[in-house]
Image (cartoon, rainbow, N blue to C red):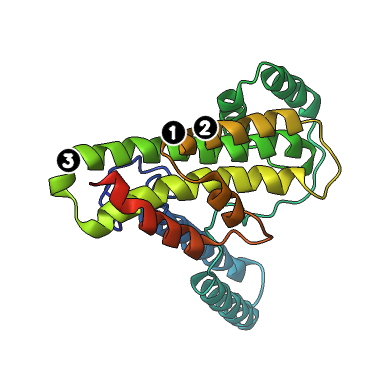
Amino acid sequence: MKCKICGAMYESDLDYCPYCHSENDVKSNKKLEEELKGFDEEIKEIHKLPNKISAFSVKIVLGIVLLLSVIIVLVVLNSDSLFSEKTEIKEETVDPNASKHIEKLEEMLEDKDYEGIKEYISEEDIYEGEYSKYIEVSDAIRYYNWMILDIEFLETVQEEEEYWGIEQRKNAVYSVLHSGLQCMYTVNDCCNDRVPKNNEEYLKEIYEMAWDELEKLDFDKEQCLKLIDGEVFNDSKIKQYAYEEYERFFE
């Protein structure tokens, strides 16, 4: 599908555009439609109640269900974070397959198969706390992969410079820097102020992988480290620095 913000083409099953990271409206709207469809199914079930209870009681129940449905829909429509990545909270459960999953994930971690870990977690849909050691690695490598895609996009824009406007060129540089620093920031966030999970070696390797790519593009390390030094990932300052650097990519 085509991104409405930057115009790039990407797979429709992604939550965000891998180039400018804007939300996939089509996927978000589809999820909302599924939620609303669920409400319709619940209301249909209520219509079967007259065979069991009085008509008067049915009206009361229908009224309550309808009112609750309206409230839920309003909450869904006004929630800014419902469809954002990482906002889904699941109950802590004991996974009967935990031993099998952890054994497999541990093997991939020792082999430094970071991409395999990311794919396995996604395929098995395992996001509970017992897998946090591997989820952290998955998150870091995901941002790294985004950066690689952003670098490829930047190279395309450089090769076809005449077809891209100034803002699109600036955003191409910004996307690379944003993804790379997001990867490094995520590693720092995972490794600092917490109980070690014996994955620090692997996280730091991904950190260095990300910095190596940024260094190839001649970004200043001291400036980059300042941008990710803090409790908040300061997107506006990263964009400002990227825009300052933009001209040397399009001389």
Q: Is residue 105 above or below residue 172?
A: above
Give the amino acid type for the residue marked by disc 3 in the picture. Answer: Glu
For this view, does 53 lie left or right of residue 119? right
Mark 3–mark 2 CB contact (< 8 Å): no
Identify the disc placed on residue 212.
2
- Asked whether disc 2 touches disc 1, contact meaning CB atoms under 8 Å apart, the reply is yes
Q: Which residue is mark 3?
A: 160
Query: In the rendered image, which residue does mark 1 sit on?
Result: 216
Q: Is residue 145 above or below residue 86?
A: above
Q: Which circle, 1 or 3, is nearer the viewer?
A: 1
Most foreground residue, 42 or 48:
42
Callout 3: 10 Å neighbours few (<14), some, many (20+)?
Answer: few
**Which of the two discs, 1 and 3, labels the residue nearer the N terminus?**
3
How far is disc 2 from disc 1 in space, using C-alphas?
Answer: 6 Å
Is residue 239 found left or right of 116 in the rendered image? left
Q: Which mark is residue 61?
A: none
- Whether residue 20 can be seen here: no
Q: Position of residue 45 (x, y in %)?
A: 56, 62
Identified at 52% across, 72% down, the residue is: 73
Identify the residue shown where x is 61% and y is 68%.
49
The residue sitting at 57% across, 56% down in the picture is 227
**Where does the image place residue 17, in percent across and percent down from the top left?**
39, 48
Sequence order check: which comes first, mark 3 or mark 2? Answer: 3
Instruction: Pinpoint residue 164: horizontal percent, then vertical percent.
Output: 18, 51
Secondary structure, mark 1, is helix
Q: Position of residue 149 (x, y in %)?
A: 39, 36
* Real-space CA distance between mark 1 and mark 3, rounded to the nearest whole angstrom: 21 Å
Give the residue furthest to the left: 162
Q: Residues within 10 Å of mark 2 (few under 14, many from 20)?
A: few
Q: Residue flagged by tag 2: what amino acid is it?
A: Asp
Q: In the rendered view, tell whether residue 183 sits above or below residue 209.
A: below
**Label 3: which secondary element:** loop
